[in-house]
Image (tube, rainbow, N blue to C red):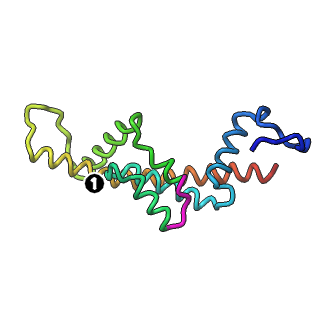
Amino acid sequence: MYAGKNQSDNQQTPQQLTWKQKLKNFLTSDFKIKHESNEKVAAAVAVGVLVGILPIWGFQMMVGVAIAQFFGLNRLVVLATSNISLPPMIVGVLYGSYMCGCLIFNDVPEASMDNISLDMMLSSGKCYFVGAIILAIISAAIAYIISFLLLHLLRRKTQQQ
């Protein structure tokens, strides 16, 4: 990783690298995506986002690695992107999942503590689970498109240099 005294003039030492170059080196060497196709890396990102939003809490990473292994995707990329449901993002994921389900079932959420019942909780749970699956599929498709386009642009730019 660190160049010794026998380095050529066109190589930079780690102290001379900019933060963009360090990030690029990390993404291409540490994630080992340099020799994988854009489609495979984007698919790994999409699988990670998909399992990260699915309501299989506690098993998201295991399911993600199993899917990555089955389809021959980069497991490290899947693991990294499956962490979409970490505490800063979980509120948006839960709310988005619930609202997607409410749109599907034409259910208007009532925010009242007075009429809590088993039927209301079952209806809310149904909205959440169905909405989470729909949100996961939509988010995975968006993640695939964005990561594919970014990889295409970044790799094309490095090939021209």
At numbered mark 1, what does the secondary structure look like: helix, strand or loop? helix
x, y percentage for residue 152?
Answer: 66, 54
Instruction: Name the residue beneath numbered marker 1.
Output: 130
Q: Residue furthest front?
A: 5
Quarter of the figure that contains the N terminus: top right
Image position of 111 with respect to 151: above or below: above
Taking the image as shown, residue 115 lies to the left or right of residue 160, namely left
Asked which quadrant contains residue 15, the reply is top right
Magenta region: 71-76
Disc 1 marks which amino acid?
A: Val
Q: Position of residue 147 (x, y in %)?
A: 57, 51
Q: At x 66% / y 40%, what residue is drawn?
A: 23
Indicate yes or no whether the magenta region holds residue 49: no
- Number of numbered discs on residues: 1
Q: Left of 44 or right of it: where is 9? A: right
Q: Position of residue 90 (x, y in %)?
A: 36, 39
Residue under the point 34% across and 49% down: 58
* Few, some or many residues within 10 Å of mark 1 (<14, 14–19, 20+): many
Q: Is residue 36 above or below residue 100?
A: below
Q: Residue at x 56, y 58 (%)?
A: 74
Left or right of 87? Residue 131 is left
Left or right placement of residue 113 versus residue 103 in this view: left
Q: Is residue 72 magenta?
A: yes
